[in-house]
Amino acid sequence: MGGPSAEREVSLSSGQECAAALRDEGFDVIEIDAGPDLAARLKDLSPDVVFNALHGRWGEDGCVQGMLEWLRIPYTHSGVLSSALAMDKERSKQVYRAAGLPVVESVLADKAEVCARHVMAPPYVVKPYNEGSSVGVYLVMDGANTPPQLSEEMPQTVMVETYAPGRELTTTVLGDQALTVTDIITDGWYDYDAKYKAGGSRHEVPADVPQEIFDACLDYAVRAHKALGCRGLSRTDFRWDESRGLAGLVLLETNTQPGMTPTSLAPEQAQASGMSFGALCRRMVEDASCDR
């Protein structure tokens, strides 16, 4: 849990929640705030299983997964390749396209170029291509006269993608089974605060959408999970433009280590499917392995 990424605070919260749930399930749990000595600490502790509650770079992009494979310690969630693919938003879109899944147009661009001119016609979104939790997302709407001025924290290469209007939907996949669909309702953009602050958003589970859209979300989420080679738990996010019907449903991204905080979507979907938070954590531990 924790670690050095931009999503450190979310990861600490996820880790604390999962550790408490696993203790209630009868497991002996040691919490580790991942730092430069992580490999040495894991070697000394020699745990039966690592429950990976890290989010963002290093913990979710294949780096820690590679370390755990090297140490031959069974771990939860996806393996090296699928973690790296899903964290790289542009490469994961290439996988989606190859699998026949609907996505919006996107390009990778130099940060300086994005600040100097519109690299595509507004409306569009600018974001890091390898972070999550809506960290560093810029929305450039129709009629914007000037390009966005990105913060110093933004990476040198960013992703620019066509803005997808509509409702925010998401589906969790556990194993190879899609759980349900959530409609995420906010007053504005579904940003970091909307995701993690109490009252930031309202979740309608199951989503009140046409059956065709509901079924498509379940189908697309499983297909994305399999196309990327995910294991264990993943969550795929969508935007749906109601005015366009099924043609208005597009995939945004797949999270290989979705949040496990009190306001997080995956545990909420598991609960709606009859699985308690403790049972979800237990299932993930029992599914842990190497060679994922």
Image (cartoon, grey):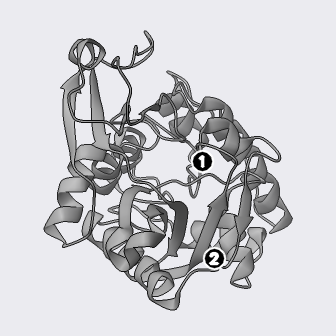
* Horizontal side of residue 5 vs 186, given as left or right: left
| Residue type, label 1 | Ala
Q: In the picture provided, is 6 more to the left or to the right than 161?
A: right
Q: Quadrant of the C terminus?
A: bottom left
Asked whether 20 or 225 is in front, the reply is: 225
Secondary element under disc 1, as helix, strand or loop, is loop
Label 1 Cα neighbours within 10 Å, binned few <14 / some 14-19 / many ≥20:
many
Amino acid bearing label 2:
Ala
Which residue corresponds to the image point at 27% horizontal and 17% vertical from the top-left? 111
The image quadrant that residue 284 belongs to is bottom right
Q: Position of residue 225 (x, y in %)?
A: 36, 69
Q: Residue furthest bottom?
A: 211
Residue 182 higher or lower than 44, as above or below: below
Q: CA distance from mark 2 to mark 1?
A: 27 Å
| Dot in front, 2 or 1 | 2
**Which residue lies under the disc numbered 2?**
207
Q: Residue furthest left?
A: 98
Indicate which disc, 2 or 1, sits on the residue closer to the N terminus.
Answer: 1
- Up the image or down, 215 lies above or below 160; here it is below
Please name whichever residue, 263 or 101, is drawn nearer the observer in this view of the structure. Answer: 101
Left or right side of 205 for 168 = left
Q: Which numbered circle lies on residue 53?
A: 1
| Residue 287 seen by the camera | yes
Q: Residue shown at 36%/78% (left/top)?
A: 246
Q: Is residue 266 above or below residue 70?
A: below
Residue 131 in percent (x, y) is at 43, 36
Residue at 48% from the left image edge and 40% from the top image edge = 132
